[in-house]
Image: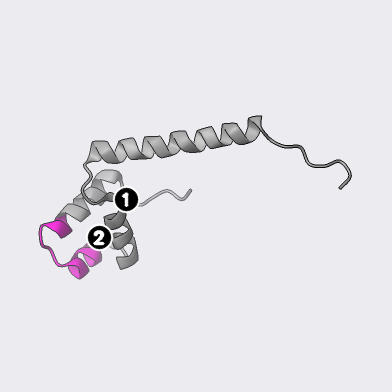
């Protein structure tokens, strides 16, 4: 996964500035964020605080590690006749 240019706290700060009434186009220019990115962030993180955001990412990481473990343990071998 590609690393974000923005930390969790920076994302939350940008979203809080938008909620406080700062014009969105001006906010996007200041921070160098595309409108698509901003609206994805708003859909995903609006109403969260930093601790909740961190917990959500920990759960996603745990789920992916369980998926990797599941795939390794229960891998079905390829047929030998192919």
Asked if the residues shown at circle 1 and circle 2 are in contact, with their CB atoms under 8 angstroms apart, the answer is yes
CA distance for labels 1 and 2:
10 Å
* Residue at screen point 58% across, 31% down: 69
> Which x, y percent locates residue 66?
52, 33
> Which x, y percent locates residue 20?
10, 57
Q: Is residue 66 left or right of residue 4?
A: right
Q: Determine if the magenta segment contains residue 21.
A: yes
* Residue at screen point 23% across, 49% down: 12
> Which x, y percent locates residue 79?
82, 42
What element does badge 2 sit on? Answer: helix
* Residue at screen point 18% across, 68% down: 26
What element does badge 1 sit on? Answer: loop
Q: Is residue 61 left or right of residue 10?
A: right
Q: Is residue 29 left or right of residue 56?
A: left
Above or below — where is 54 with respect to 21? above
The residue beneath circle 2 is: 31
Span colored in magenta: 17-31
Above or below — where is 21 with respect to 76? below
- Residue 6 marker: 1
* Residue at screen point 30% across, 67% down: 35
């Amino acid at each position: 996964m590609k690393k974000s240019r923005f930390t969790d706290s920076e994302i939350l700060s940008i979203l809080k500035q938008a909620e406080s009434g700062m014009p969105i186009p001006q906010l996007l220019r200041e921070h160098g964020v595309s409108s698509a990115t901003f609206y994805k962030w708003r859909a995903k993180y609006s109403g969260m605080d930093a601790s909740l955001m961190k917990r959500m990412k920990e759960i996603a990481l745990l789920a992916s590690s369980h998926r990797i473990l599941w795939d390794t343990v229960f891998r079905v071998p390829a047929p030998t006749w192919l």
